[in-house]
Image: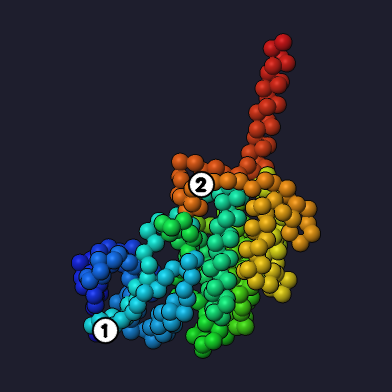
Amino acid sequence: MSHSISVGDQLGPYKILDVLGSGTAGTVFQAQHEATDEILALKTLTSETVTKEEVHSRFIREIAVAQKLENEHIVSYFDCGVEEGILYYTMEMVSWGSLADVLFMRRQLPWREAVECGVHLCQGLSHLHANNIVHRDLKPANIFLSDDGRLKIGDFGLARDLDAGRLTMEGMTVGTAKYLSPEQACGEEDLDGRADLYSLGCILFEMVAGRPPFKDTDGYNIVEYFEMVEKHVKEPPPRLLDLVAGIPDDLDQLVAWLLTKERTARPESAADVATDLEKILDGQAIDATKSANLPPEENDSSLTERLRDMSKPQSPITWGKLAMIAVALLAMIVLALLNR
């Protein structure tokens, strides 16, 4: 019988220093290797779920997926072990928080920062998909900011290794509703990397517009969850240019392309999307569409430093803001005329 882990406990060669986060199945701790003094993240099953066979199998599958991956835009796996019946694995410590933290504080990002984030994510997704792995739960909370300036994809609890057996039942919907691809929403089994590209489209949309394509309430009940799922399957998403002024036409088109309901109509690969995002940053046209013709912008600070600069929200100008400015200017003109 396993016991629960607390701060100050020793687990194998690791001393538990702090609790970083906890979910329904697992807890992530900050830990220190007793021999090297290295600070890292350690994940283990919660004591309530360790005896549940499906949860245990999924945790082992998560470890197996992490072991296959080695990329600068993927949270690095170190090792795993069993101590006193407790199964755990360790990974790199990404102490700068998540993209979800950034969006909570800033709500919106300048379109250039959002596009840069997209390039980083595409590089990580390219590595995942090259190893026949579909993340299936790509969302801001699973995207981490590292101190080397990179965004890194983590949390492979729902990832599917296409080379391994399946754990989910046929027809079962898996993923987070706000970022769920239509094929996942329908419980399709033959998923591929284009499901993650749809989720990427949702994230790009949210970074630029300050909201996901389909708006939701702060909390989910089961009815709201399936209402959101149905929107991904049936409801056309809004266009970015209808919500945010001053962004390149090509960015609006690329996000709409990623959010296409039929996966065969989406971009072929994350590498292709990265190429298009880089062209948008450079002011080049993509797929023969009209070029935004915007000059590249130089910036010496790293992406993650700029994302964490909470003193400069730098929200894009929305049509609503433009309307308010226009009304204010009109009022000033009217007052000036009345005072003549």
Q: Position of residue 170 (x, y in %)?
A: 57, 85
Residue 294 visible in the snapshot: yes
Q: Is residue 337 above or below residue 242?
A: above
- The tag on residue 300 is 2
What is the CA distance from the residue labelled 2 to the residue labelled 1?
A: 49 Å
Q: Is residue 294 above or below residue 134?
A: above
- Which amino acid type corresponds to the residue marked 1 in the rendered image? Gly
Q: Is residue 177 left or right of residue 77?
A: right
Mark 2 or 1, closer to the camera: 2
Whether label 2 touches label 1, CB < 8 Å: no
**Element at badge 1?**
loop
Q: Earlier in the sequence, mark 2 or mark 1?
A: 1
Foreground residue among 137 and 230 = 137
**Element at badge 2?**
loop
Foreground residue among 282 and 163 = 282
Residue in view at x 47 percent, y 79 percent = 68
User: From this viewpoint, which residue is outermost toward the bottom?
Assistant: 165
- Which amino acid type corresponds to the residue marked 2 in the rendered image? Asp
Q: Position of residue 321 (x, y in %)?
A: 63, 39
Q: Is residue 106 left or right of residue 255?
A: left
Q: How many marks?
A: 2
Question: Which picture quadrant has residue 53?
Answer: bottom left
| Pointer 1 local density, CA inside 10 Å: few below 14, some 14–19, many at least 20 | few
Residue in view at x 67 percent, y 37 percent = 322
Q: Position of residue 86 (x, y in %)?
A: 28, 80
User: From this viewpoint, which residue is outermost toward the top?
Assistant: 340
Residue in view at x 69 percent, y 69 percent = 267
To which residue does mark 1 refer?
Answer: 85
Q: Position of residue 177 (x, y in %)?
A: 55, 67
Foreground residue among 87 and 228 = 87
